[in-house]
Every structure is written in C-alpha cells, then in structure tokens.
C-alpha cells in the first residue's frame, strides 16, 4: 500500500512539473538528459497452452508487475533500475511444469545517446541483472548481462520507425537469448501514440534445453491522461518453435500477452 501511495504521489508531481502535452521518452532511442527522470509501473500477463509430444497438454502462464525508473545524469546519459514481482508463474521445466512466485531479480543499467545527425537517432546501453532474489522466489539464480544497440529515424507525419538488438548473456550453464525487433511509432495528435512491433527471440541450447525461436507481434498505445502522465495498454501474440526441456518435449505453440502500465515523465 505504501508503494502504491508513493507512486501516485510521484506521478502527481510529474503532472505539476510542466503543462505541455506530449512530453515522454518512451522510444527506445529517447535517452534522458541531466535532470530528467521517469517512472513506470506495469502489470503483464502471458499465456500459452502447448501440447507435449507423446500426449497431454499443459498451461503456461505468468502474472507479474514490474517497477522501473530512470534518471538522466548528463546530456544523453541515463541510469535505470527495475525489479519484477511475480504473482504466479507456470513454466515448462525439466520434469514437467514448475510453479513459482515472489520478488524477481534487480536489473541496473546505463544508456547513452550516440553521435548522429538529422532525423536519425542512435543509442547503446548495458544492463546487468543481479542474482538478488534467489531461486526460492522468482529469481533465475544467476547474473545476466544485457547490452543494447538501437536506431530510429523520424519521418514526416509523426511516424518513427526503429529497430534494436538486445541479447541476454547468461553464462553459468544457462541459455543465452538474442532479441531483434523492428517497429514504428505513429502519433495521432498530441494525446495518443500507437507503437507496433515485430520481434524475434533466438535462445541457444544449454544443459538439458534445446535451442528454440519465438516470433511475436506487439501493439502498445501511449494515452496521455495528464501532462507527463501516460497510460500504456498492451496486447500481443507469439509463436515459438518446438523445444525440449529435460524429459519434456513441447510442440510448436502459439499464445498471447497483455498488460497495462502507468508511465510518468519528469522533465
């Protein structure tokens, strides 16, 4: 309850820090400058109902919230922190479906604007997910390194295509994931922006897990409720290839994702 009151108070402060509509730094290449800050709290859901080779169906699902924040420390340089809280997750494990919940691992990172010109924007970053939660909660039991390379180009009529590459390098016998995304933002006036994205994740083989791929389409809206305060509804669908985890073999399966977030920008 105290956390919710604090978030509401901070977002109220964001409303009072300016009265211009259209202020946000949600594009992947929009890096905070010194003195700027942002805060986001989101709730996400993921669902799939795959068939196992040899018979039987399982339900894979995840309910979680994530709190993240960023602060600009210099022109084009920002520091970020995020931590998830998993309400309930059911995922395919080596011996069947595993369930867990609790606090997730803390991720800290830094992002930088790279030299560019005109409508082109370039950014790079590095995040580190620390083993803070442990496997008894919703942690992964290891430290991950998450670099980022991103580019965007602002066209006329308020359209901005973008792309990024974000690998998750896990080590310690865990599989790595390489994520590629191509998307575009389209602003409809000053109060609403639509972000559409196509993404592909490629996970390497490791231990008792085979390599596999996942392809997804995602739509997110930026609905400005007040100056500097946005509501972000999200809906997506995905399809991933066959995979083997321990003794379990899963068929190619489709699923969907959905969520809602509140974003506050402090110019």
Image (cartoon, rainbow, N blue to C red):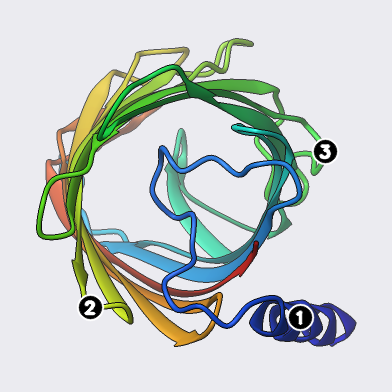
Among numbered discs 1 and 3, the one appearing first in the sequence: 1
| Label drawn at residue 189 | 2
Instruction: Single out the residue that lies furthest toward the right.
Output: 2
Q: Is 200 placed left or right of 38 in the picture?
A: left
User: In the image, is residue 191 above or below residue 220?
Assistant: below
Q: Is 4 placed left or right of 173 in the picture?
A: right
Residue 264, picture quadrant: bottom right
Q: Is 211 placed left or right of 37 in the picture?
A: left
Residue 9, picture quadrant: bottom right
- Can you see residue 51? no
Disc 1: which residue: 13
* Quadrant of the image containing the N terminus: bottom right
Mark 1 and mark 3: Cα distance apart in space? 30 Å
Across and down, in percent, residue 3 comes to 83, 77
| Structural crowding at the residue carrying mark 1, measured as other residues with C-alpha within 10 Å and reported as few (<14), some (14–19) or many (≥20) | some
- Can you see residue 265? yes
Disc 3: which residue: 132
User: What secondary structure is marked by label 3?
Assistant: loop
Residue pictured at 47% horizontal, 58% vertical: 90
User: In the image, is residue 80 above or below residue 25?
Assistant: above
Among numbered discs 2 and 1, the one appearing first in the sequence: 1
Mark 2 and mark 1: Cα distance apart in space? 24 Å
Residue pictured at 64% horizontal, 42% vertical: 33
Contact between marks 2 and 3 (CB within 8 A): the answer is: no
Across and down, in percent, residue 214 comes to 21, 37
């Amino acid at each position: 309850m105290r956390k919710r009151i604090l978030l509401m108070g901070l977002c109220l402060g964001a409303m009072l820090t300016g009265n211009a509509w259209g202020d946000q730094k949600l594009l992947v290449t929009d890096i905070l400058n010194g003195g700027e800050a942002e805060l986001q709290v989101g709730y996400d859901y993921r669902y799939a109902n795959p068939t196992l080779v040899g018979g039987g169906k399982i339900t894979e699902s995840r309910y979680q919230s994530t709190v993240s924040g960023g602060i600009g420390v210099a022109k084009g340089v920002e520091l970020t922190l995020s931590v998830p809280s998993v309400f309930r997750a059911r995922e395919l494990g080596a011996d069947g479906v595993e369930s867990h919940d609790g606090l997730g691992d803390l991720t800290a990172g830094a992002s930088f604007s790279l030299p560019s010109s005109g409508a082109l924007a370039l950014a790079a970053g590095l995040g580190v997910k620390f083993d803070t939660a442990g496997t008894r909660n919703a942690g992964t039991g290891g430290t991950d390194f998450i670099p980022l390379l991103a580019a965007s180009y602002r066209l006329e009529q308020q359209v901005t295509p973008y792309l990024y590459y974000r690998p998750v390098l896990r080590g310690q016998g865990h599989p790595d994931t390489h994520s590629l995304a191509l998307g575009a933002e389209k602003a409809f006036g000053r109060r609403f922006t639509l972000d559409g994205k196509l993404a592909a994740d490629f996970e390497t083989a490791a231990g008792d897990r085979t390599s596999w791929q996942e392809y997804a389409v995602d739509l997110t809206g930026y609905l400005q409720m007040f100056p500097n305060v946005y509501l972000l509804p999200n809906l997506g669908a995905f399809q991933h290839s066959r995979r083997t985890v321990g003794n379990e073999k899963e068929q190619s399966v489709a699923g969907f994702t959905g969520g809602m977030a509140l974003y506050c920008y402090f110019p």
